[in-house]
Amino acid sequence: QVQLVESGGGLVQTGGSLRLSCAASGRTFSSYAMGWFRQAPGKEREFVAFISWNGGLTDYAASVKGRFTISRDNAKNTVYLQMNSLKPEDTAVYYCAARVYGRGVYLLPNDYNYWGQGTQVTVSS
C-alpha cells in the first residue's frame, strides 16, 4: 500500500507562485512514476505533469508548460510541483498520483494506482 500526502496549496494572486509537495510512503518510491492532476468544480480530473521514476522523463499539459515544473527527490520520497505565473484558471484541487510499475509516460488518471487526498489551489484575479 502506498500513501500519498499533498501539501503546499493555498490562496495566491494572479501571477504568484506556489510549490506543492507530495510525500509518499514505501521503500520503493524511487521506482514509481509520479503525476500531478487537478480537478476544478464541475470539471473532470485533468493531467498536469508527469515525471518518470528517475526524473529522466517529464511531460506537461499544454496549459501549464513553461509555467509549472515537476521534480522529485527520491531520497526524501517526495515529488514537487513548482507553479509560477499562476492564473485564475489554475484554480482547482491538485492531486498527486503514483504508478508502481512501468517505464513509460503516463498521462491518464487510469494509468495510476494510488492517489493523494488533494490540496486546494485558489488563484484570485
Image: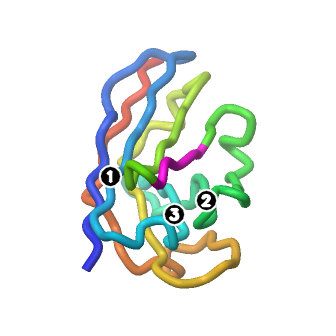
**Residue depicted at 71% across the width and 56% down the height:** 59
**Residue depicted at 40% across the width and 72% down the height:** 28
How crowded is the residue under tag 2: few (<14 C-alpha within 10 Å), some, or many (20+)? Answer: many
Residues rendered magenta in the picture: 70-74
* Residue that numbered label 2 is attached to: 50
On screen, residue 62 versus residue 86, left or right, reads: right
* Residue that numbered label 1 is attached to: 23
The percent coordinates of residue 93 (x first, y second) are 36, 48
Q: Quadrant of residue 104?
A: bottom right
**Residue depicted at 49% across the width and 57% down the height:** 37
The percent coordinates of residue 4 (x first, y second) are 29, 61
Image quarter where the N terminus lies is bottom left
- Which amino acid is tagged 2? Phe
Distance from Cα at disc 1 to Cα at disc 3 = 11 Å
| Disc nearer the start of the sequence (2/3) | 3
Up the image or down, 43 lies above or below 76; here it is below
Residue 40: in sight, yes or no?
Answer: no
The percent coordinates of residue 86 (x first, y second) are 55, 26
- Which amino acid is tagged 1? Ala
Give the total of numbered labels. 3
Tell whether label 3 touches label 2 (CB within 8 Å). yes
| Disc nearer the start of the sequence (2/1) | 1
Distance from Cα at disc 2 to Cα at disc 1 = 16 Å
The percent coordinates of residue 108 (x first, y second) are 58, 74
Secondary structure of the residue carrying numbered label 1: strand
How crowded is the residue under tag 1: few (<14 C-alpha within 10 Å), some, or many (20+)? Answer: some
Secondary structure of the residue carrying numbered label 3: strand
Residue 58: in sight, yes or no?
Answer: yes
On screen, residue 27 versus residue 111, left or right, reads: left
Distance from Cα at disc 2 to Cα at disc 3 = 6 Å
Secondary structure of the residue carrying numbered label 2: strand
2 vs 1, front mark: 1
